[in-house]
Image (cartoon, rainbow, N blue to C red):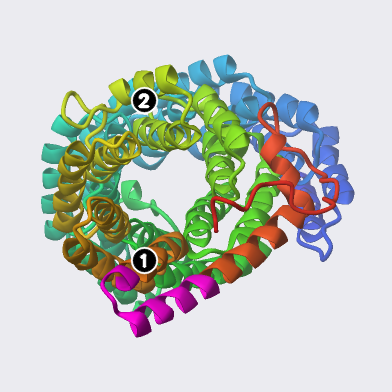
Amino acid sequence: MASNVEAPESWYLALLGFAEHFRTSSPPKIRLCVHCLQAVFQFKPPQRVEARTHLQLGSVLYHHTKNSELARSHLEKAWLISQQIPQFEDVKFEAASLLSELYCQQNLVDSAKPLLRKAIQISQQTPYWHCRLLFQLAQLHTLEKDLVSACDLLGVGAEYARVVGSEYTRALFLLSKGMLLLMERKLGEVHPLLTLCGTIVENWQGNPIQKESLRVFFLVLQVTHYLDAGQVKSVKPCLKQLQQCIQTISTLHDDEILPSNPADLFHWLPKEHMCVLVYLVTVMHSMQAGYLEKAQKYTDKALMQLEKLKMLDSSPILSTFQVILLEHIIMCRLVTGHKATALQEISQVCQLCQQSPRLFTNHAAQLHTLLGLYCISVNCMDNAEAQFTAALRVSDLTTHQELWAFIVTNLASVYIREGNRHQELYSLLERINPDHNFPVSSHCLRAAAFYIRGLLSFFQGRYNEAKRFLRETLKMSNAEDLNRLTACSLVLLGHIFYVLGNHRESNNMVVPAMQLASKIPDMSVQLWSSALLKDLNKALGNTIDAHEAAQMHQNFSQQLLQDHIAACSLPEHNLISWTDGPPPGQFQAQNGPTTSLASLL
């Protein structure tokens, strides 16, 4: 009699043991694992075993095969059966969580939402699962760009975490909400929320790694908030704190001790991902401030770290980090006169976007913008206009207002150079008027809008008006250490004073412009400055200095010319013609450069 009672358990454990052995084999033997689990049903097992086996089968099929229909069928059965069994929370809520993930993968979002809502409703006595499901539904709303619903759920989660005594998870909910409010540009709500988060984080006494990871999350939000606002100088104390914080985390050992409160069983990001993220925001800061060699150094470190991580980890966030890093370093390369390398990196971004439709949807506007900037650098103005127009067409104004203003500013510079697009130009300038209702709060973009006005006035010969605009740019860029804008404004002011015959004042502008451009280094401003210095010194009778400046100008011209030819000869140069749909996979080889070099020389 006893052996009959034990029999079901022994056969079940044997089949489970075999299934796990096959699943963890190297390489995994998934077909055999699935056979063992399916064999469980032959024994007409009790409901608990039946539900758990359906969950195990669904999970194995979902994670290791492409048979999503069969995975879905097993997960639906696990969810249905487990709801009828008391005290069976783990199976019930894991089935709901995994099933809603699968629904989203199959574009059945309208099936995923009610499923998660039901699971949230019945999980209130299970803190870990209640919090996890709230995060999952908030993430689903975020992916659908319904940030209001996502924020509401995160607010519910924060209050629930407070009630169950988890200040750590309350902080995670609030910081996540702060991140979405920053995306929505609801700055009035962000500031009090971040202040509250800062207090909670500092007062929380718990696992040191969890505490430091909360601080990293908090400081990343603060740093990105400053950078979005173009406040490169003001952000420095926060950025320094963030860098110190990540150094602290890297010295701490992961404790295996589980938190006593099940609601605390969450991590924001793995330690290695946080390191890459801190490199990333450092690169963003260096690029905005015009420390391009520093940006290059941190990009190299971050990309090396990413390559190592991607060998072991298929998390989509790593590809997102990689794309954002490449976007920033591409802009740096265009400034430092490495167009061919920039073009190859643009092609790399295209390849990453081809592997992930969601990545492409989120970065299509940035990709067209980068191609527009490349087109300007090789003097293909018609293509630059087409790229910026494509970028405006695919950009999401609700969450990318700064990107929109950046594109419009660069498109305006193209129209100014073309010289015959007055109607379109004035229409654009009305939308980015720095003196009146500027559309974004970015200090940097407003300073750039003044520079664009100054550039237009210069080309129109209205020099006093140009000086007024450029002095505004200088005042704003000096206030926040925006080195590139400072260098561009100084050299343009120097050019204006030269045209007006005020050689002494011109020299006072061009010499610091050259020094700053060399420090960045900004190849175009160096070329422009050396040409002005050559003419200025000749006019002032400084023959030796004039000769030296002429030699410098010749060297910069040669470097830019060689890079120009190299870039235009690459097969990837054909990307400048792509303005619609997904990025092309293959490129035809070029016969040679097809663009004018006049603007460079």
Local crowd at mark 1 within 10 Å, few (<14), some, or many (≥20)?
some
Q: Give the farthest residue toward the bottom.
A: 544
Residue 149 visible here: no
Q: Earlier in the sequence, mark 2 or mark 1?
A: 2
- Image position, residue 73 (x, y; %): 74, 24
- Residue that carries the numbered disc 2 in the rendered image: 147
Residue type at the position of mark 1? Asp
Q: Quadrant of the C terminus?
A: bottom right
Q: Which residues are magenta?
A: 537-555
Q: Secondary structure at mark 2?
A: helix
Magenta stretch encompasses residue 349: no
Magenta-colored segment: predominant secondary structure: helix
Residue 180 found in image quarter = top left
Q: Which mark is residue 535?
A: 1
- Image position, residue 69 (x, y; %): 78, 26
Magenta stretch encompasses residue 549: yes
Residue 322 found in image quarter = bottom right
